[in-house]
Image (cartoon, coloured by chain):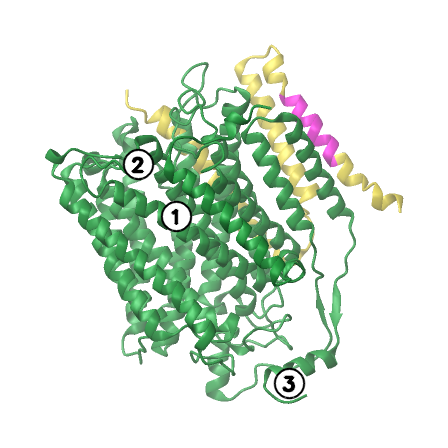
Chain colours: A yellow, B green
Amino acid sequence: MIKQLFPIRHVIGYLASLVLSAAALVVIYGDLSDAANMVVLLVTAIIQASLQLFVFMHIGESADTKKELYINIAYALFVGLITIFGTLFIFVWGWYA
Amino acid sequence: MDLEKFKVHGEPLIYGAMISIALATIGIIVGLTYFKKWGYLWREWLTTVDHKRIGVMYIIAALLMLFRGGVDALMMRLQTAAPEMKFLDAQHYNEVFTTHGLIMILFMAMPFIIGLMNVIIPLQIGARDVAFPRLNAISFWLFFMGAMLLNISFVVGGSPDAGWSAYFPLASIEFSPTVGNNYYSLALQISGIGTLMTGVNFIVTILKMRAPGMTLMKMPMFTWSVLITNIIIVFAFPVLTVALALMMFDRLFGSQFFTMANGGMDMLWANLFWVWGHPEVYIVILPAFGIYSEIIATFSKKNLYGYTSMVFSMVIISLLSFLVWAHHFYTMGQGVMVNSFFSITTMAIAVPTGVKIFNWLFTLRKGRISFTTPMLYTLAFIPIFTIGGVTGVMLAMASADYQYHNTMFLVAHFHYVLIPGAVFAVIAGFHYWFPKVFGFRLNDRIGKHAFWWIAISFNVTFFPMFFLGLMGMTRRMYTYSEESGFGPLNMLSFAGALGLAIGFVILVYNIYWSTRYAPRDTNGDPWDGRTLEWATHSPIPAYNFAVIPKVNSRDPYWESKQKNTPLYEDKITKIHLPNNTGKPFILGVIFFFLGFFLVFSMWIPAIVAGVGIIIMLAVMSFERDHGFYISAEEVAATEKKLRGETV
């Protein structure tokens, strides 16, 4: 009963994402160099994303749909990277100057 | 409290709209009470989790929105029919074209397609419902409440007026101080969350719940198109969600994401909007391609030509749809390199689309074609859509686009793509699947009358706009001078719009006429269909299939009819179904109030509504509901009755 009301894995996952979000605030309130800021953001973002995938989205479970899973993740990466780098391409690298 | 901010002043038309809304509401309430239908409405519809009923509700909402958006269109055409018209003023015209665009794309085309998906997909894959029936009900109610929120803006506080694309800085609080664009951000947000959940629901349904034997490459083409559409939904809608949230922060809480000062960037809105907006075009067009593929195969009595290439071209379209968004703002200031890149990716989309067009033509070749109403829409789609596609390639050339950017040429182009590509398709699908849901066909003769009115008037309305655009008439102009020479073609266009209105009235009359007089269909397969949805009875029993069919080809039902092989091998057993629930509806209503209070910056009520949503979500998470069983005997009895045997 207590296990059902207090799913330890999920609660820890939830707390961890809160901590990671707070940790990312170092970029604003801390006094680090730009490079260090980027490292902080990248590291917290990657841990945050994998936390979501493993704890809440059960990516480790059920072996029979691995292929569909990887296709979906590849598609998501494709769309995410295209959006980010496409925007940079439009507004920074390829901007009329 | 200050009631002044809720009022919209000055226009006799708006007072007319208020009165008609009030009368319609009173009419509905009195009607429901008089016929004692409140209980029926609540038990059978508002609380339903049945995919068929949810689909029907989506389609009814879409038809209502079609007429709302259509009246907007008529008002615009009337206002521009002659030079210096005084029918609408500039502000009112801005509101009308903004809501026309929003309603037609988000609250007409989308729900119509999602409605058809809801009704047909579980049947086509031989399933008893979608994967998450309750989530499906939540999706519907969020969409519906979002649509209602946008619709009341017209009479409470004022409509959004910065175009359906709501470009910043115009849409910012500085330049659009009314609540109109608050409605935009919140109504779209609420219905967008619903759409996102639909996306998840249908991906899981199609990947996990297909009948035994139906491999991915044996799925009907409509199912394929819906799978790909929902994948696009899941990847494109989060961008809109984020963009709308930033817009809301800018307008309500004074953040500076899209302003021109304090490090904000107005152009980023246009960028994010179209990162979602272009895939959105394919979200409404790909299912249409699926509908046409089903109709062409059925009414040519042939299997679909080039099945594999159809699937691959849709996958390629879905990938390319994320690579072309900058072609919506070639003139914004990015360099030649950027425009060339997006120009090429845009033209590349014409290739897979062309493959599909040729596949349909080859399916028709040597087929035994029957010219039914849905088939007529499909056949009209091919040439009209091709005109839209070719003018699209013209617009895709960045250097040429500088000539007709934001002119009526563009307006003509996207109506030439979206009306045959989405509206004809949903009407064709509506006629095609209507007998499946209601057990009788829409009258073919009246249907054809409506078709000819719609198809011809469509061209009369929009073809002149190509020339108007080339003559230099920009879009969204509320009036023009006589010397411009735009008058005659605009008048022609208005005449076409009236014809379209007549066509749609005939279409609705056909629903009324057929409901009363059309012969009832008894075998569930009026068109001699090919896919599984025709294998069950019409109207469809709550459990869809008494026994889950076994599939071993792409056209399983056709195969079983031709070779006389049985589709069902198992015995009837008890069937598990989900219980109805009123919670999705209540959740939707709370979302509506949250949206409304946020629009008017009424913080305390908004917080109360927000807490209400969290409570509802918690209650629903902890609720245990195991559904119910229909016993094997009851299923057998229902089956006998539906087959017309006496029990």
Q: Position of residue A4 (x, y in %)?
A: 84, 46
Q: Are marks 3 and 1 on the same chain?
A: yes
Q: Position of residue B265 (x, y in %)?
A: 42, 22
Q: What residue span does the magenta drawing correspond to?
A: A13-24
Disc nearest the viewer among 3 and 1: 1
**What separation in Å lies between label 2 and label 3 (alpha carbons)?**
60 Å
As shown in the figure, which amino acid type bears the numbered disc 1? Gly
- Quick one: SS at disc 3? helix
> Which numbered tag is attached to residue B69?
1
Horizontal relation, residue B451 to residue A31: left or right: left
Residue with the mark numbered 2: B88
Q: Are marks 1 and 2 on the same chain?
A: yes
Q: Are marks 2 and 3 on the same chain?
A: yes
- Quick one: SS at disc 2? loop
Q: Quadrant of the C terminus of chain B?
A: bottom right
- Quick one: SS at disc 1? helix
> Which numbered tag is attached to residue B640?
3
Please give the name of the residue rendered at 60% of the width and 54% of the height, measured from the top-left corner: B136
Disc nearest the viewer among 1 and 2: 2
Horizontal relation, residue B35 to residue A4: left or right: left
Q: Position of residue B303 (x, y in %)?
A: 39, 75
Magenta span dominant secondary structure: helix
Q: Residues within 10 Å of mark 1 (few under 14, many from 20)?
A: many
Q: Chain of mark 3?
A: B
Q: Mark 1–mark 2 contact, CB under 8 Å? A: no
As shown in the figure, which amino acid type bears the numbered disc 3? Lys
Q: How many marks?
A: 3
